[in-house]
Amino acid sequence: MINFVRTSLFLIAIVGAQSLYAQARVAVLHLAPFAADIDDTAVNIAVNGDVALENVRFKDFVDYIELPAGDYEIEIFPVGSENPAITGEFALEDGQFYSLAAVGNGITQDLDLIALADGDGSGPSGDNVWVRVAHTAPFAADLEATEVSIRTADGQLVNGLTGVPYGVNSGFFEVPAGTYDLKVASNDGQVNYIDPLPAALPAGASVTLYAIGDGINQPLGIIAFPVGELETRTPVDNSANGWWNILEGSGQGFILQPIPSQNRLVGTWYTYDALGNPVFLTFDSCQDDTAEDGSFECSTPGAFDGVTAETALFLSTGGGSQEGLEVLTERVGTIEFEILGCKDAMAIVTLDGGSPEMYTGTRLTNPFCVE
């Protein structure tokens, strides 16, 4: 849960010393993961020589406060130190909104204070929302190595945002209000870095999504300003990939194939029919129904969070070596998977018209998972 920093000292130090007529609005965010212990990230913030905010920790922020237009010197002191770790000078203009963010970790990227111009507060039109993405996660020293893409859960690029390096922001772009399931991934979308849970973006709002953390001192995450920190799930990777043996039935098992770029799980269940003949069924976490002609096309991938997935189960018949024999595919049930670790998994198979059956899986091949 985000901790909102008290603003009373800020107002006393700044507004009380100048004109009470506020002409600008300023938000302050601590996004600098320079220590592994969250308490050790605490800083005091001085404005024009006076301490205005005390004991501000990583991920804390202050929503917009009113300040007179003019020039300001901002100094950030680690708690207990008399020497500022970050210093910056900023000019605030009449009627404008700003966000000041402490960034960097002092290891891979220098500590710094950045200012983002947030506009005049007019907001988006109609039932839309303004969204801005800011890359403030210093997880690599080489800027090219920090490049990311912003995608939906099914891997589609958002507003063409790819090749975005540390320190860059997208500027505001307008999208329809609604619930969005976004993630931060590698440029090609094959590796997921940050995967927040779906978040509602209400009409009329202006939201900045800050990628935060460095993976060294503090884990990667997302701050949605002014909403707060977004809850994240374990990014989908290839750790579930491989052959899994079913303990409850000799010679039966699952072949799991995650598709990280789409947050999707596909694969094969190999089992036997009532006569002992081998049967191969396929499954897919995409829950779209088959078309009338029996074909299957996934228009809304996803539904795999790296640990659990409910998949649609399909049986294909026909085909083979006989020319002209049509392959027919039909949905015949569901399989719910839970990956318990590198070696263990559970699966609940429910065939249409039948009762759920639970299976215990142990991994036969382990190409990607490391305990």
Image (cartoon, rainbow, N blue to C red):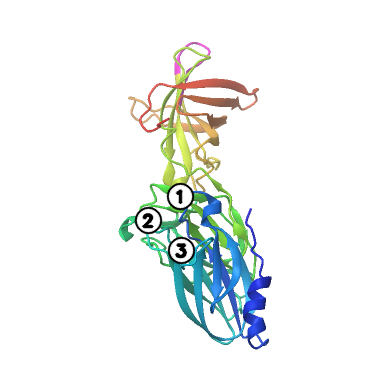
Q: Against 42, is 324 above or below?
A: above
Left of 334 or right of it: where is 138? Answer: left
Residue 266, x across and y down, in percent:
46, 35
For the residues labelled 2 and 1, say whether their Cβ atoms are less than 8 Å apart.
yes
Residue 275 magenta-drawn?
yes
In the image, is residue 356 above or below residue 306? above
Circle 3 residue:
103
Which residue bears the numbered disc 2?
Answer: 107
Query: Could you tell me the amino acid type at mark 1?
Result: Asn
Q: How crowded is mark 2: few (under 14 residues within 10 Å), some or many (20 or more)?
A: some
Q: Where is residue 102 in the image (x, y as percent from the top left)?
A: 49, 66
Q: Nearer the viewer, mark 2 or mark 3?
A: 2
Residue on which the image places disc 1: 217
Please state which of residues 261 and 349 is positioned toward the viewer in this rendering. 261
Precedes in sequence: disc 3 or disc 1:
3
Which tag, 2 or 1, sits closer to the chain's start?
Answer: 2
CA gap, disc 2 to disc 3?
Answer: 12 Å
- Tell me the magenta residue range: 269-278
Quarter occupied by the C terminus: top left
Say which residue appears at 46% left-offset and 32% top-offset. Answer: 328
- The residue shown at (61%, 59%) is 228
Label 2, label 1: how far apart the Cα atoms are: 10 Å
Q: x, y percentage for residue 69?
A: 57, 86
